[in-house]
Amino acid sequence: MQKKIPAVYMRGGTSKGLFFHAGDLPSRSDIRDAVLLAAYGSPDPNRRQIDGVGGAVSTASKVAIISLSESPDYDVVYNFGQVSIDRPIIDFKGNCGNISSAVGPFAVDEGLVPAVEPLTRVRIHQKNTDKLIIAEVPVKNGRFDEDGSYAIAGVPGPGAKIVLRFDDPGGALTGKLFPTGNVKDTLDVPEVGPIELTVIDAANPVILVQAAALGLSGLEIDEVDNDASIRQRLENVRCAVSVEIGLTETMEEATLRSQAVPKIAFVTAAATYQTLDGSTVNETDVDLVGRMMSMGTLHKSYAVSGAVSTVGAAMIPGTVAHDLLKPEAHQKEMLSIGHPGGIIEVGAVIEKTNGTYHYREAVLGRTARRLMEGSVLVPEKYFKDD
């Protein structure tokens, strides 16, 4: 026999997953996770998630758990989980900026906040990072209005623009904007050697490495997924940094149990290249080109939380990202990153006080859509002892 759990399947930005009311899931975290893994069809050694609703790629294997906030400073609480495809793990350590863009529309449509036309501000307590995200949600006739002309790279067709404001995103997981204490470090990585990098924690901890330091052009797309040696070098760097900043005790633990964070990207100066759909991104249209990894494979666009960190780093002198910008880009308040799917733009407010940088706010636009609503079915055996 199976149990029904009320759920909504939503796209947020370039990701999608199930959205649940916290009260509809088991209260014990171990049983909750077992139920969610079963719902997604994980773990699947063949990486297909054939016995669940998971999409067999990291961007479609995500979960959002929503509840009303007890604090007057927020409207809702949002807990994000990255559901592993081939391992019995749900990583609740970091956040997904793309999924964040669907939280406001979910809150409006589920009646968790009063619907105000034409725009409803939803104050989201991002539980994983203990940060505030403000979503500006278009509303019509008391519901989220998904219709609009705003387009984002990686999603076919336009939609309504949802503005996300990440308040004070620095130190989301480690408590420090620069977890190592430096804007740039040289780390001796096993099987890679000494490599220059920047570790910045804004919305999520992200490692930035110049592509040339890895023997890459920075314009690679298919080459990354087709070359295991590239992926292994990147994973070695990611795992070494995870240990260095105290997220895991060993590199092995980082691979096995902390696939989602820290994230890693390799970046290069603005250049002209072909996107996944064959269109051209011109050097003049971007300030930086980046390729980000997502749970061991190339992200086909660019993680929102990764973009928040990357743009923040690019605006701070001395980081590996700032070193790649053209002089005229150094004073911009909004920067564009070219990625495999196109371009993502992020506005960032960075202040320097007494020699210390403070990331005040990151702003960007996303789209979202409610895809399906009803119940997800999970075998009763996963609910034992609840």
Image (spheres, rainbow, N blue to C red):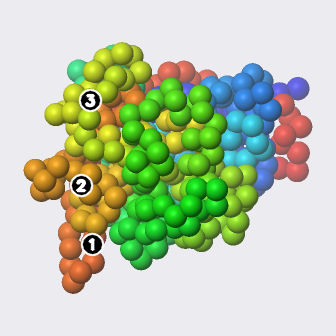
Crowding at mark 2 (Cα within 10 Å: few <14, some 14-19, many 20+): many
Please give the residue where the numbered disc 2 appears in the rendered image.
348
Would you say the residues marked 2 and 3 are in contact, meaning their CB atoms lie under 8 Å apart? no
Callout 3: SS: loop
Q: Nearer the viewer, residue 292 or 356?
A: 292
Would you say the residues marked 3 and 1 are in contact, meaning their CB atoms lie under 8 Å apart? no
Looking at the rendered structure, the number of numbered marks drawn on it comes to 3
Tell me the kind of residue under disc 3: Thr
Q: Which residue is pictured at 68% across the width and 61% down the height?
A: 251
Q: Upstream in the sequence, badge 2 or badge 3?
A: 3
Q: Which residue is pictured at 57% across the width and 70% down the height?
A: 244
Please give the residue where the numbered disc 3 appears in the rendered image.
272
Would you say the residues marked 1 and 2 are in contact, meaning their CB atoms lie under 8 Å apart? no
Residue 201 drawn at (x, y percent): 43, 62
Mark 3 or 1, which is nearer the eye? 3
Please give the residue where the numbered disc 1 appears in the rendered image.
357
Side of 288 relative to 40 (left or right): left
